[in-house]
Image (spheres, grey):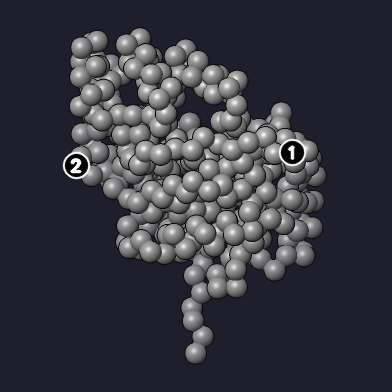
């Protein structure tokens, strides 16, 4: 008697990524117990990306489907793919074009997701190791110890989308929320799943190697220089602009949130728009936090300066 295999959809977005794309594609390992397929949304590449995809599809045991992206940036490209109504699976994995995955990445993620009630939106994510353009190891992303939550999610994203794997309930939640305009698809996924009371699983063990090079859409969160740039951005007002965009999307999806997290969302708006005492009260009673001591100091400073 044969068992019905779980279905996995790898959601890969590309744009002029031919230099490293073959290594990423070849690192996608799907076990025999899972029926996997790769869905690619290409944003109009003018390098050899289409040729790399065609060559891989001709040789791969995995079905590969390539479609045209919206050409509105990487976040919009991923949003168009994850909300597409013609892609059906039990599990979904975001994939960037220039990483290479650990061989057990998908097995580990699906194993953690399988123990969650399938009716509950569930998201797996992990640390990454960063490598140079030539594949030299440069360290790991920060290790976060505090539990994932919506009060953390509105402040920061805890993991890259390239590590994220989620169940059908989480994907259906993303579809119901629609193709909203957000800063990044992965941050949005963390906010939406946690806001709805879903399960967010953070794995302290890296699941892939993130290649740091001049063409990255978003840089690595390793090293003093990169982290300093992020904190300076937090205080410069850049994050305030990001939060304004995210808030429009969050308010449009608030019907999916738990009552407690709708209250957190209201407190977050107070944290951004109230007077000083009201902002400090919202910071305290909303339970907002970053994952590191330095991040929390930055959060306090941004609250005082009205930069959130």
Report the number of numbered marks.
Answer: 2
* Residue 213 placement (x, y as % from top left): 71, 32
**Residue shown at 45% from the left, 54% from the top:** 166
Report the side of 139 relative to 94 (left or right).
right
* Residue 15 placement (x, y as % from top left): 68, 40
**Residue shown at 75% from the left, 58% from the top:** 56
How crowded pointer 2 is (Cα within 10 Å; few <14, some 14-19, many 20+) is rated as: some
Element assignment for label 1: loop
- Indicate whether 185 appears above or below 64: above
Please tell me which residue lies in front, 174 or 152: 152
Pick whichever of labels 1 and 2 is earlier in the sequence: 1
Quarter that holds the C terminus: top left
* Residue 295 placement (x, y as % from top left): 42, 24
Mark sitting on residue 219: none
* Residue 209 placement (x, y as % from top left): 65, 44
Q: Quadrant of residue 168?
A: bottom left
Identify residue for label 1: 136
Identify residue for label 2: 259
Element assignment for label 2: helix
Q: Quadrant of residue 188?
A: top left
Q: Are marks 1 and 2 in contact (CB under 8 Å)?
A: no
Report the side of 72 relative to 99 (left or right).
left
**Residue shown at 28% from the left, 48% from the top:** 197
Please tell me which residue lies in front, 303 or 180: 303
Mark 1–mark 2 Cα distance, whole angstroms, equals 47 Å
- Indicate whether 231 appears above or below 155: above
Q: For the residues carrying marks 1 and 2, which lies nearer the camera in this image? A: 1
How crowded pointer 1 is (Cα within 10 Å; few <14, some 14-19, many 20+) is rated as: few
**Residue shown at 60% from the left, 68% from the top:** 31
Residue 180 in sight from this viewpoint = yes
Residue 175 in sight from this viewpoint = no
């Amino acid at each position: 008697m044969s068992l019905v295999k779980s279905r996995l959809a790898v959601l890969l977005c590309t744009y002029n990524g031919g230099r490293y794309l073959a290594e990423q594609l070849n690192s996608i390992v799907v076990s025999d117990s899972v029926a996997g397929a790769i869905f690619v949304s290409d944003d109009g590449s003018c390098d050899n990306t289409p040729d790399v995809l065609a060559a891989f599809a001709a040789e791969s045991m995995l079905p590969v489907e390539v479609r045209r992206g919206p050409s509105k940036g990487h976040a919009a490209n991923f949003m168009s793919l994850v909300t597409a109504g013609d892609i059906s699976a039990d599990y979904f994995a975001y994939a960037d074009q220039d990483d290479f995955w650990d061989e057990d990445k998908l097995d580990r993620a699906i194993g953690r997701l399988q123990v969650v009630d399938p009716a509950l939106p569930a998201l797996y994510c992990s640390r990454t190791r960063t490598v140079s353009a030539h594949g030299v190891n440069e360290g790991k992303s920060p290790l976060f110890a505090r539990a994932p939550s919506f009060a953390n999610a509105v402040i920061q994203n805890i993991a890259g989308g390239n590590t994220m794997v989620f169940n059908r309930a989480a994907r259906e939640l993303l579809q119901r929320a629609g193709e909203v305009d957000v800063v990044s698809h992965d941050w949005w996924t963390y906010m939406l799943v946690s806001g709805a009371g879903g399960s967010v699983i953070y794995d302290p063990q890296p699941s892939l190697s993130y290649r740091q090079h001049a063409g990255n859409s978003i840089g690595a969160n390793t090293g003093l220089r990169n982290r300093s740039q992020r904190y300076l951005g937090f205080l410069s007002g850049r994050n305030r602009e990001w939060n304004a965009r995210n808030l429009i999307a969050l308010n449009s999806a608030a019907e999916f949130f738990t009552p407690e997290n709708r209250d957190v969302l209201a407190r977050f708006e107070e944290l951004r728009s109230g007077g000083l005492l009201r902002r400090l009260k919202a910071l305290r009673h909303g339970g907002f936090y970053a994952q590191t001591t330095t991040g929390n100091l930055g959060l306090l400073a941004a609250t005082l300066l009205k930069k959130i």
